[in-house]
Image (cartoon, rainbow, N blue to C red):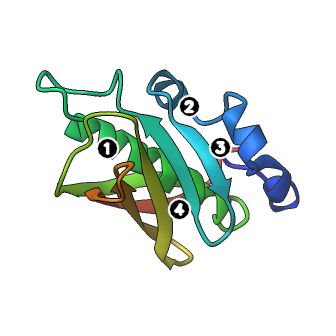
Amino acid sequence: MAVHHADRDAFYTVEHLNAGRRGDLAERMGITITECTRERISATMPVAGNTQPFGLVHGGAYVVLGETLGSIHSNYLAPEGMVAVGVDINATHTGSATEGEVTAVCTPVHVGKSLAVHEIVITAANGRRCSTVRITNFYKPMKP
């Protein structure tokens, strides 16, 4: 999703990202971007279709949601001529949703010349935190 600086604000709009530009996996999981600014990106994901056998949201689904947002936002903030690639991700699950949808809010912890670190807080419809994901992206030169 690397985009030249002049085109960034037009590319990283909710409408543009939700028009098939957030990745095949994110689309299959029903992830919908609800906000995208330089300060944060947020999204929702349905519980239905993203559960493990006990009816709880699968922990891996939380990680996919977090990585989707962290990767998009890292590329939005990438230095000119650079592309963000994930090098580390971890998640701590402290609860789980069983119905409705979950909401994720991704904010940068650090954005530098070579690394971006984001924290993604995922909550159930009742506001209870379900998972906290942290992703580190490395900025590398974009291939021509």
Marks 1, 4: nearer the viewer: 1
Farthest residue in the left direction?
54
- Location of residue 35 in the rendering, given as x and y in whole percent from the top left corner: 65, 55
Cα–Cα gap, marks 3 and 2: 10 Å
Q: Quadrant of residue 1?
A: top right
Helix, strand or loop for disc 4? strand
Mark found first going from the N terminus, 4 or 3: 3
Cα–Cα gap, marks 1 and 2: 16 Å
Q: Which residue is mark 3?
A: 1
In the rendered view of the protein, which quadrant contains the C terminus? top right
Q: Badge 1: how crowded within 10 Å, few (<14), some, or many (20+)?
A: many
Tags 4 and 3 in contact by the CB under 8 Å rule? Answer: no
- What is the number of the mark on residue 62? 1
Q: Which residue is mark 2?
A: 23
Cα–Cα gap, marks 3 and 1: 21 Å
Helix, strand or loop for disc 2? loop
Q: Amino acid at mark 4?
A: Tyr
Q: Is residue 83 visible?
A: no
Residue found 35% across the figure and 24% down from its top: 48
Q: Is residue 19 left or right of residue 58?
A: right
Residue found 53% across the figure and 78% down from its top: 112
Marks 4, 2: nearer the viewer: 2
Q: Quadrant of residue 39?
A: bottom right
Q: Amino acid at mark 1?
A: Tyr
Mark found first going from the N terminus, 3 or 2: 3
Q: Which residue is mark 4?
A: 139
**116 lies above or below 36:** below
Q: Amino acid at mark 3?
A: Met
- Location of residue 56 in the rendering, given as x and y in whole percent from the top left corner: 19, 34
